[in-house]
Amino acid sequence: AIAIPTLNRHDLLNPTLQKYVSDLFPSTEICIFDNGNQPIYKHENISFPFLKQEENLFVSGSWNELCIKVFSNYDYCLMLNDDICIHANERQIIQLIEENPTVNFFNSLFQWSSFLLPKKTYHQIGLFDENLKIWFQDNDYEYRMKRENVNVLTTSVLNPIEFRKDGTVERNPILHKQFELDRQAYFRKHGAGPGSELY
């Protein structure tokens, strides 16, 4: 299944969802985690398995909720940002999996704007660290996978054809401040920044 967390980007997300269900992923369930109670495009393939959010669960919390939901029914979760449109279709994603049976994590060249996570890897590595709310949760997961010798493939198949970053975080001083908080949390956890971890 596809999983998409979203916050205040329905204007970017809705046209993409229409393209997914009509063209790229007509037989794939799409699970939405909406942190902003937005008017999101409705379709029989699009599910909204979460109640109205009383608070923003941010990136890590949203990813965890989506993974738990998806992995209750499926073996792979294609996690997508709400500001991209991936260029691959469901046939190409299935082909990617079938041609790489020993790969345990697939990432795009746009680093975590879209990634394909197998259930077995999520169970092996565990939850995304919710102490890292907006930033560095991807660095943390990469480092944890590296320590577990997870076989990672970076592939252009997962690249977006559109990347429409709208600057929501940069315009919001509260979210912008979170960068420093997340950076400090990462340093406390690993003793240094990404690429220089001590533990």
Image (spheres, rainbow, N blue to C red):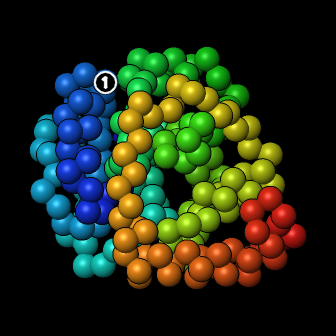
Q: Quadrant of residue 131?
A: bottom right
- Up the image or down, 157 lies above or below 39; here it is above
Q: Residue at x 56, y 41 (%)?
A: 110
* 136 left or right of 134 in image: right
Q: Quadrant of residue 196?
A: bottom right
Q: Residue at x 51, y 31 (%)?
A: 158
Q: Quadrant of residue 160?
A: top left
Give the SS element for disc 1. helix
- Out of 181 and 172, give the one closest to the viewer: 172
- Out of 45 and 164, give the one closest to the viewer: 164
- Up the image or down, 148 lies above or below 105; here it is below
Q: Is residue 120 visible?
A: no
Q: Residue at x 41, y 82 (%)?
A: 174
Residue 74 location, x and y as percent?
A: 42, 39
Residue 23 location, x and y as percent?
A: 25, 22
* 33 left or right of 116 in image: left
Q: Dot 1 surroundings within 10 Å: few (below 14), some, or many (20 or more)?
A: some
Residue 112 location, x and y as percent?
A: 55, 48
Q: Residue at x 74, y 57 (%)?
A: 143
* 142 left or right of 19 in image: right
Which quadrant holds the N terminus? top left
Which quadrant holds the C terminus? bottom right
- Out of 88 and 69, give the one closest to the viewer: 88
* 151 left or right of 7 in image: right
Q: Amino acid at mark 1?
A: Leu
- Up the image or down, 143 lies above or below 80; here it is below
Residue extending furthest toward the right: 198
- Up the image or down, 185 lies above or below 136; here it is below
Q: Is residue 145 visible?
A: yes
Residue picked out by circle 1: 24
Q: How many marks?
A: 1
